[in-house]
Amino acid sequence: MSDDRKPRLAPMYRLQFEPAQDCWVLLYPEGLVKLNGPATEILKRCDGKTDVAGITADLERAFSTTGLRADVDDFLRHADEQHWIV
């Protein structure tokens, strides 16, 4: 994933907390995808304004850690393959 790409949720998807599932989900017309914590945190930052480097830096600041870039890239690649992001 290139540093300057600014991912955002694809138009048919919506990220929201689902009380019935007690977790964050990605809703789309045919159903939903239950998300784990890291996936949720990455997708929350996919606003179409923040580039991949900025998403990674924000996560590293928020969780007081370093070295998250490979994990962010892996997840964003998967999200892209699933057409969750554009």
Image (cartoon, rainbow, N blue to C red):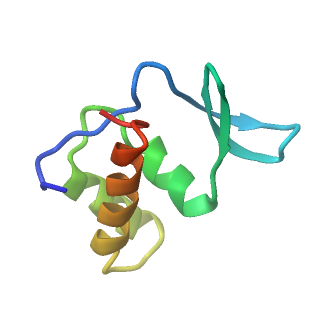
Nearest the viewer among 13 and 69 is 13
Q: Residue 63, relative to residue 54: is it above or below?
A: below
Q: Identify the residue at image location x=11%, y=47%.
A: 4
- Residue 60 lies left or right of residue 2; in this view the side is right
| Image quarter of the C terminus | top left
| Quarter of the image that includes the N terminus | bottom left
Residue furthest right as drawn: 20
Q: Is residue 60 above or below residue 28?
A: below
Give the mark count: 0
Q: Residue at x 31, y 53 (%)?
A: 55
In this picture, residue 68 sits left or right of residue 62: left
Residue 18, percent across and down?
77, 36
Vertical relation: 10 (above or below) 43: above
The image shows residue 35 at horizontal and vertical percentages of 63, 51
Percent from the top left, x then y, of residue 65?
Answer: 40, 79
**Residue found at x 65% / y 24%:** 30
In which quarter of the view is residue 2 placed? bottom left
Q: Residue at x 83, y 47 (%)?
A: 22
